Image: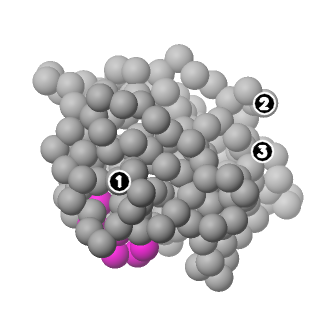
Amino acid sequence: FVLPPANSNMRRVYAYLVKHRNIDRSVVAHFAREKLLYEDADYHNAVFVGTDEDGVPRHAHKRSANSSASFRLNVEGCDPRHSFHHIGTDGSLYVFEAPIDMLSYITLHPEDWQSHSYVACCGTSIQPVLKLLERQPQINTVLLCLDNGRGWPSGQPAHEGTAGREVHGGKLIPAHKDWNDDLTAEEPSYAQVMQ
């Protein structure tokens, strides 16, 4: 697995995420500073990086920064267990399908966001969730934040692979199709909470 080469700046990715997707600039800057988000040199895609326990990049998800294109894919050879994520200090893990949904949710709910853990599965694979549960024994609540109308293909992830500890589960459902649609909607909307 090799990360795509980085561009010398992130102008196109910042413009796409902040101006087109309405993601808070400070949230984008946080992940860029952590070297978990950058612009690739060849096509100027946004690259969302996932690391292992030692901070070594093991996963990369590319998303077109062109507002009229919908290109997105995981880089060949990456390990799906280590997709794009943030590890916080409290017991909650918020699970998303896509990195943009994760960043949109954080923008919508900025208060003390860094204390929570988040993972973008870059699809609907449960592997990144199970890996974080293994890595982070303090996690005791898993909240599925999937697109409206979607569910896990294999049932509740909260009770699988938790090494005997009790982990609670719940769902947060966006009011629109996904969390970025909620963020960019002209009228305020309220997500549904299901336990």
Label 2 SS: loop
x 44%, y 44%: residue: 63
- Bin the neighbour count of mark 3 within 10 Å (Cα to Cα): few under 14, some 14-19, many 20 and up: some
Label 3 SS: helix
Q: Quadrant of residue 66?
A: top left
Q: Which mark is residue 154?
A: 2
- For the C terminus, the quadrant is top right
185 left or right, relative to 170:
left
Precedes in sequence: disc 1 or disc 3: 1
Closer to viewer: mark 1 or mark 3? 1
Closer to viewer: mark 2 or mark 1? 1
Disc 2 + disc 3, Cβ < 8 Å: no
179 left or right, relative to 50:
left
Residue that badge 3 annotates = 159
Q: From mark 2 to mark 1, how far is it between C-alphas? A: 35 Å
Q: Which mark is residue 44?
A: 1
Closer to viewer: mark 2 or mark 3? 2
- Residue 2 against residue 179 in the figure, above or below: below
Viewer-side residue, 95 vs 103: 103
x 85%, y 58%: residue: 164
Residue type indicated by callout 1: His
State the extent of the magenta-drawn residues as a range. 27-35
**Residue 139 x/y as whole percent:** 62, 61
Residue type indicated by callout 3: His
- Bin the neighbour count of mark 2 within 10 Å (Cα to Cα): few under 14, some 14-19, many 20 and up: few
Precedes in sequence: disc 2 or disc 3: 2
Membership of 18 in magenta stretch? no
Q: Main secondary structure of the magenta part?
A: helix
Viewer-side residue, 182 vs 16: 16
Label 1 SS: loop
